[in-house]
Amino acid sequence: MERFNTKAFRTHMDNWVTKVDDGDLSRAWEIVIACIEVHARLDRQPKQSKTAAEREAYLDFALAFEGEEATFTMCGMLHELDQMTPEHLRDDGTFDRMMEEAIAKARGVRVKREAPPPEPPKLKLLEGGKVV
């Protein structure tokens, strides 16, 4: 199984949700956490540790975000979390960026960000060949 640090994932998302401080988003995130824990408990294999079962459930949630095959439950929770994110944070890509960062941290990899475009040069007004 792929390495996936559920604590790193949860901490990153918990911090973001707390910072956003939106009731609908906070509620949706708490539901996601509770449902993932139930999912892990119900899908736990004989002799599989609770930690391994939770890691697998969180990984399934991450894979749903990445467009991989996932249960309808994971897809539904992801959709709910996305829809309860304040609209401006969805539209500007913040929600996606937070999920990508949380997943990267859970996998122990650095998030690759494109460098922002360079600032255009300042225009100078010339008058008679001299800068004004």
Image (spheres, helix red, strand yellow):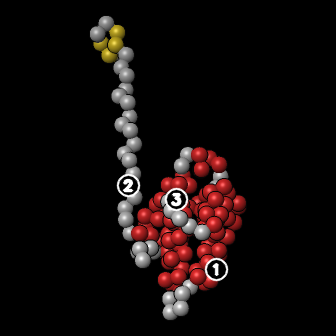
User: How many C-alpha atoms fall within 10 Å of the one at disc 3: few (<14), some, or many (≥20)?
Assistant: few
Residue at the spot 70% in from the left edge and 61% down from the top edge: 23
Q: Which residue is outermost to the front?
A: 69
Between residue 20 and residue 108, name the one nearer to us. 108
Say which of marks 3 and 1 sits in front. Answer: 3
The type of residue carrying mark 1 is Val
Disc 2 on helix, strand or loop?
loop
Q: Earlier in the sequence, mark 3 or mark 1?
A: 1
Residue 67 got which mark? 3
Q: Which residue extends farthest bottom?
A: 47
Q: Position of residue 2 (x, y in %)?
A: 41, 74
Q: Position of residue 67 (x, y in %)?
A: 52, 59
| Viewer-nearest of discs 1 and 2 | 1
Question: x%, y% of residue 82?
Answer: 62, 57
Counting residues from the N terminus, which is met first, the one under dot 1 or under dot 2?
A: 1
- Disc 3 marks which amino acid? Gly
In the structure shown, which secondary structural element does the residue marked by tag 3 occupy?
Answer: loop
- The x and y percentages for residue 130 are 30, 12
